[in-house]
Image (tube, rainbow, N blue to C red):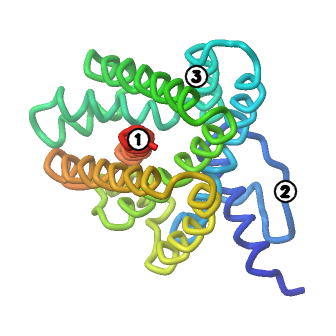
Amino acid sequence: MTVSYLAVLFADMAACVRFFSRMPLHKLNAADDPAALPDFSQISRAAPLAGAFVALPAAGLLLVLGATSLPSLVVAVMAAGVLTIVTGALHEDGLSDVADGFFGGATISRRLDIMKDSRIGAFGAIALVFAIGLKVALIAALLDRFGAADTALLIVTVEAFSRFLMVWQWHRLPLARPDGLGARFGKPSDAALRQCVLVMLVVLLPALLALPLQTIAVGIVIAVSASMSVAQVALSKINGSTGDVLGAIQQISGLGFLTGVLMVTV
């Protein structure tokens, strides 16, 4: 029996969701094998869809609590908490490891060793406090400016776009560790990246139709610049990418997108 392209794409999305989050997904269709090891040389094309899916609980919370009299800051704290819980703080952990390793080690080998250490240091703690605090402040500001519905849409869009940028940098950067995530599960192929771009354009369409174009455009520019900056620092510090670097790219580019959206007066 022939399996359709969409069935395979959604199976790839499910595989990405299982890897990058704590969300339990049963078998979606005939193309989906929950027991199979992920092959990111192919399934990475569905990363934006996975990001959008992972954001749905937080988006739903924003829609519900945004309609109440709760202060925006309270709703923002809860939404940021749900985002973190759903992913098991996977990308936040990557950000803290990168901060500890990049700024706590004097050599490439020492930086990589620090990044593998499960303990958190001062740089990592500061990075987490800054990132989570900024995310809460940005979501609260979005609620005040755009309302609950548009903020929920933006959160879904940002989680999708930041994972597209993660795949892009994963594809273009060399691997810093021969035994790391990229070596074990495969780097995104050229074909997977091209398809990831198309998937991202589809996911981006609702935000482009519902929100002012200039706000989305500035958000995209800042997010892309943030991902490029993290990638450049990774090249200078450890000569490439690791899973932690990819997590840091997702977190920082997502914050960049939200910041860019708020930089434009509408």
Tell me the CA gap for discs 1 and 2.
45 Å
Give whichever of 238, 263 is nearer the camera.
263
Q: Nearer the viewer, mark 3 or mark 2?
A: 3
Residue 203: name its quadrant. bottom right
Q: Residue 222 carries which label?
A: none
Where is mark 2, residue-wise? 27
* Secondary element at tag 1: loop
Tell me the CA gap for discs 3 and 2.
33 Å
* Residue at the image point whose x is 64% and y is 19% from the top: 75
Q: In this view, does 121 lie above or below 192?
A: above
Tell me the CA gap for discs 3 and 1.
21 Å
Position in image of residue 234 (x %, y %): 23, 48
* Residue at the image point whose x is 17% and y is 29% from the top: 103
Q: Residue furthest bottom?
A: 2
Does residue 137 show up?
yes
Which of the marked residues, 3 or 1, is nearer the chain's N terminus?
Answer: 3
* Secondary element at tag 2: loop
Q: How crowded is mark 2: few (under 14 residues within 10 Å), some or many (20 or more)?
A: some
* Residue at the image point whose x is 52% and y is 74% from the top: 192
Which of the marked residues, 1 or 2, is nearer the chain's N terminus?
Answer: 2
Where is mark 1, residue-wise? 265
Quadrant of image for the N terminus: bottom right
Where is mark 3, residue-wise? 76
Residue 264: name its quadrant. top left
Give whichever of 118, 55 is nearer the camera.
55
